[in-house]
Image (tube, rainbow, N blue to C red):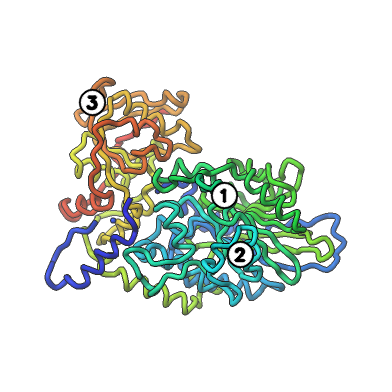
């Protein structure tokens, strides 16, 4: 897998050679998100903003400490503003303005907590700089009590847990932190220049706030790669924070990214940390975990009687120790604001704040000075609108950071490679086909001269607007730098591949195809849903015939549980997926277009 900054080296070279060359060729794991940001519109935002409150019925209104938690998740290096519906939202400068305003409103203090995927699958102005600007966003929000964590790296984990009790930021790893392997993930945290740096900072100092993760284990040492938890001190009250990432991370990250690591059960790892914190007398405990779900939209104010969220995160919460009060979640890119009872009936507050800087969880805790436990808690998911409230005055220093990043990557990002007549999107037909997916699959098949190509939907990270298409637009769509891998598969193996779109999946992952068409029946059992597969010549696929197939290196290694692909023979590694897409777009008659053509048909 290529590093993000390899592209920057090209960009810098372009800066010096633009006068001499009118055209250059440019060269640069992955997951399918169940709830994409584009599916969450303004109506869902309004519902998410309704505050949910729980109060301990035994509380006698003794003195309390009031602390605010500001939960963010799945930032994905989103330095620049986005739109939600037709309104501007997010971006680092607007998000910072909201978080600073919320912090200032907190009676006894505020702590910013991020639930993973702060880096990875990022737009070019962060990704091409190895996502150092994404970490810098949080560094700028850090208070005067925060210090670079590299200063404490050699200390035992139980000692590190108490080194920054008044620092106002905490982070954990998501699956995308492993896109380039654990060494690069730890470099971002602990500092040191990348081999193709420096970027904006002359010497990368790493994070100025603790990173924690309880369930990512170094197989060599048997110890967690990060401290599993940390303790904050707020007006005399101690609060424990525990980090975790979904245990299925190895199935959604390129295998080289998680080599040498073990991802143990989330609840078991969290509960082990809870025991340690309880022995230290800590009774208020917050979990930040990169695992989650999307809450069903409903009308009216947030209702604690609405059916609680389901899925893996709900099962994890149910198994947590009753000393856990709040779980700040991520990964699903949706909103969650619910009370979920554990197996002993303890009501645990579970939140998630959409993604990509467009919202945060505003969580208020009242902690009894007498019992040191939470007696009241509430949360609302606040959208960071750019056209109202704090968004009207974006943070100046953060805007300067974004401008620096934009300037650094501009030579490469702004190069026009084509013009598209209509918007191409990830929006799927009822069968699972999308116009943008068709374009990408065609690019991969044509570039490698294969019979068929298959593209996983989680690798398509943005839509393509109508009009001029820049290199940066295509990078934002395919930011992972996966190689294309061509291999031989039998017709029977291709049938198995298509059946695996439902097998072993937490939700259907419908591959985007080129060179063949197929029909699937939703009424048939998983494992036997594909009823017809035809080649481009409209002839049935022969089970024993050998076909040349191209996929990206992520799923070629079995990512997204497409487990038949590692069985492919005569494997040849080709160009990077982004290069193939850029070159294909440039080769098309301009302006170009793509459409949903009926490559995939669904019955029932």
User: Quadrant of the image for the C terminus?
Assistant: top left
Local crowd size for mark 1, using a 10 Å CA cut-off: few (<14), some (14–19), many (≥20): some
Local crowd size for mark 3, using a 10 Å CA cut-off: few (<14), some (14–19), many (≥20): some
User: Viewer-proximal residue, 5 or 79?
Assistant: 5
Asked if residue 258 lies left or right of residue 110, the reply is left
In the rendered image, residue 48, in percent from the top left (x then y), is placed at: 60, 57
Q: Residue pushed farthest bottom?
A: 396
For the residues carrying marks 1 and 3, which lies nearer the camera in this image? 1
Residue beneath disc 2: 70
Closer to the chain start, of discs 2 and 3, is 2
Q: Are marks 1 and 2 in contact (CB under 8 Å)?
A: no
Q: Which mark is residue 157?
A: none
Residue beneath disc 3: 546
In the rendered image, residue 352, in percent from the top left (x then y), is placed at: 58, 55
**Disc 1/disc 3 C-alpha distance (Å):** 46 Å
Q: Which mark is residue 223?
A: 1
Asked if residue 64 lies left or right of residue 504, the reply is right
Q: Residue at x 40, y 48 (%)?
A: 29
- Residue 550 placement: quadrant: top left
**Disc 1/disc 2 C-alpha distance (Å):** 29 Å
Q: Are marks 2 and 3 in contact (CB under 8 Å)?
A: no
Closer to the chain start, of discs 1 and 2, is 2
In the rendered image, residue 473, in percent from the top left (x then y), is placed at: 31, 59
Q: Is residue 383 above or below residue 311?
A: below
Q: Residue pushed farthest right?
A: 60
Q: Residue at x 60, y 59 (%)?
A: 156
């Amino acid at each position: 897998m290529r590093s993000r900054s390899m592209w920057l080296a090209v960009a810098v070279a372009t800066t010096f050679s633009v006068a001499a060359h009118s055209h250059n060729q440019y060269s640069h794991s992955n997951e399918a998100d169940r709830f994409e940001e584009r599916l969450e519109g303004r109506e869902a935002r309004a519902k998410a903003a309704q505050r949910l409150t729980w109060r301990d019925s035994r509380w006698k209104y003794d003195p309390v400490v009031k602390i605010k938690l500001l939960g963010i998740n799945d930032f994905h290096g989103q330095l620049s503003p986005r739109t939600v519906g037709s309104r501007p939202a997010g971006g680092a400068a607007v998000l910072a303005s909201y978080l600073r305003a919320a912090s200032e409103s907190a009676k006894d203090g505020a702590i910013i907590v991020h639930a993973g995927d702060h880096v990875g699958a990022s737009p070019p102005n962060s990704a091409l700089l190895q996502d150092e600007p994404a970490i810098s966003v949080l560094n700028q929000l850090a208070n005067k009590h925060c210090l670079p964590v590299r200063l404490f790296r050699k200390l035992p984990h139980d000692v590190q847990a108490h080194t920054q009790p008044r620092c106002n930021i905490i982070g954990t790893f998501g699956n995308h932190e492993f896109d380039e392997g654990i060494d690069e993930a730890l470099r971002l945290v602990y500092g040191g220049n990348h081999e193709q740096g420096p970027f904006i900072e002359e010497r990368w100092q790493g994070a100025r706030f603790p990173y924690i993760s309880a369930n990512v284990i170094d197989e060599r040492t048997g110890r967690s790669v990060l401290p599993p938890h940390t303790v904050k001190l707020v007006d005399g009250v101690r609060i424990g924070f525990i980090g975790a990432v979904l245990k299925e991370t190895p199935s959604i990250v390129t295998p080289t990214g998680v080599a040498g690591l073990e991802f143990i059960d989330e609840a078991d790892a969290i509960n082990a940390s809870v025991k340690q914190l309880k022995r230290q007398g800590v009774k208020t405990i917050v979990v930040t975990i990169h695992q989650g779900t999307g809450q069903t939209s409903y009308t009216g104010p947030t209702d604690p009687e609405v059916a609680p969220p389901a899925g893996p995160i709900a099962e994890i919460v149910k198994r947590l120790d009753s000393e856990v009060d709040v779980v700040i979640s991520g990964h699903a890119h949706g909103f969650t604001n619910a009370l979920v009872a554990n197996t002993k009936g303890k009501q645990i507050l579970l939140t998630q704040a959409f993604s990509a800087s467009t919202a945060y969880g505003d969580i208020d805790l009242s902690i009894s000075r007498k019992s040191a436990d939470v007696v009241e808690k509430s949360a609302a998911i606040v959208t960071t609108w750019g056209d109202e409230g704090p968004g009207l005055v974006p943070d100046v220093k953060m805007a300067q950071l974004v401008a620096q990043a934009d300037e650094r990557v501009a030579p490469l990002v702004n190069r026009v490679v084509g013009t598209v007549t209509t918007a191409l999107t990830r929006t799927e037909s009822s069968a699972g086909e999308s116009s943008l997916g068709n374009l990408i699959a065609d690019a991969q098949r044509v570039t490698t001269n294969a019979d068929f190509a298959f593209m996983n939907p989680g690798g398509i990270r943005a839509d393509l607007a109508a009009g001029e298409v820049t290199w940066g637009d295509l990078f934002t769509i395919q930011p992972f730098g996966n190689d294309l891998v061509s291999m031989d598969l039998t017709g029977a193996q291709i049938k198995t591949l298509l059946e695996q779109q439902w097998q072993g999946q937490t939700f259907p992952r419908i591959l985007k195809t080129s060179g063949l068409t197929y029909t699937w029946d939703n009424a048939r059992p998983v494992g036997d849903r594909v009823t017809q597969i035809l080649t481009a010549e409209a002839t049935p696929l022969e089970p024993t015939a050998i076909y040349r197939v191209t996929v990206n290196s992520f799923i070629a290694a079995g990512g997204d549980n497409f487990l038949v692909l590692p069985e492919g023979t005569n494997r040849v590694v080709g160009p990077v997926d982004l290069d193939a897409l850029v070159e294909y777009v440039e080769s098309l008659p301009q302006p170009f277009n793509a459409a949903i053509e009926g490559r995939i048909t669904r019955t029932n």
